[in-house]
Image (cartoon, rainbow, N blue to C red):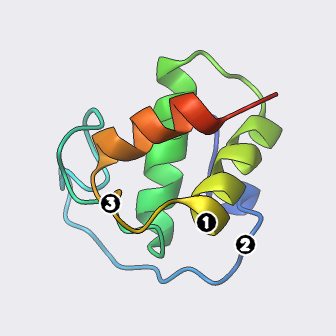
Amino acid sequence: MILFSKRNLYYTDYQWTIYIPNDPRVNGRPDHTAFNKNEGNEMVYLINKLMMIWDYRFANTGNKMEKLIHDKLPAEISSQEEVQNWLKTNLKF
């Protein structure tokens, strides 16, 4: 189920790489796989996956995640799991 997609993104400065099916950067569960916050497909994948895991249903929640990641994610956070943990701590409603 897709809750958040490319059309929901607030920012437009992403690069859009084509990934092979089942690439861990855009498929599966968030894990130790490297995360590139400048890559649109990775951003959409991670936001959508976390919205499903945390049972968030509204695109504006995805936009809050996107803005936090885009603007405030510390440079030393580099994996999907680390982003997930950082968001869990820093996402406020």
Left or right side of 75 for 68: right
* Secondary structure category for the residue under label 2: loop
**Of the residues under marks 2 and 1, which one precedes in the sequence?**
2
- Marks 1 and 3 close (CB-CB < 8 Å): no
**Of the residues under marks 1 and 3, which one precedes in the sequence?**
3
The residue shown at (41%, 60%) is: 42
On the image, the x and y values in percent for residue 71 come to: 66, 67
On the image, the x and y values in percent for residue 80 come to: 32, 47
Determine the CA span between mark 2 and mark 1: 8 Å
Q: Residues within 10 Å of mark 3 (few under 14, many from 20)?
A: many
Looking at the image, residue 53 lies above or below residue 65 = above
Q: Quadrant of residue 51?
A: top right
Name which residue type carries label 3: Phe
Q: Nearer the viewer, residue 19 or 64?
A: 64
Determine the CA span between mark 1 and mark 3: 12 Å
Which mark is drawn over residue 35? 3
Q: Residues within 10 Å of mark 2 (few under 14, many from 20)?
A: few
Examine the rendering and report whether any part of residue 40 can be seen. yes
Looking at the image, residue 73 lies above or below residue 27 = below
The residue shown at (26%, 56%) is: 25
On the image, the x and y values in percent for residue 20 come to: 19, 65
Q: Quadrant of residue 78?
A: bottom left
Which mark is drawn over residue 11? 2
The residue shown at (42%, 37%) is: 84
Eye-nearest disc, 2 or 1: 1
Name which residue type carries label 1: His
Q: Quadrant of residue 49?
A: top left
Q: Which residue is mark 1?
A: 70
| Quadrant of the rendering where the C terminus is positioned | top right
Left or right side of 90 for 11: right
* Secondary structure category for the residue under label 1: helix
* Secondary structure category for the residue under label 3: loop
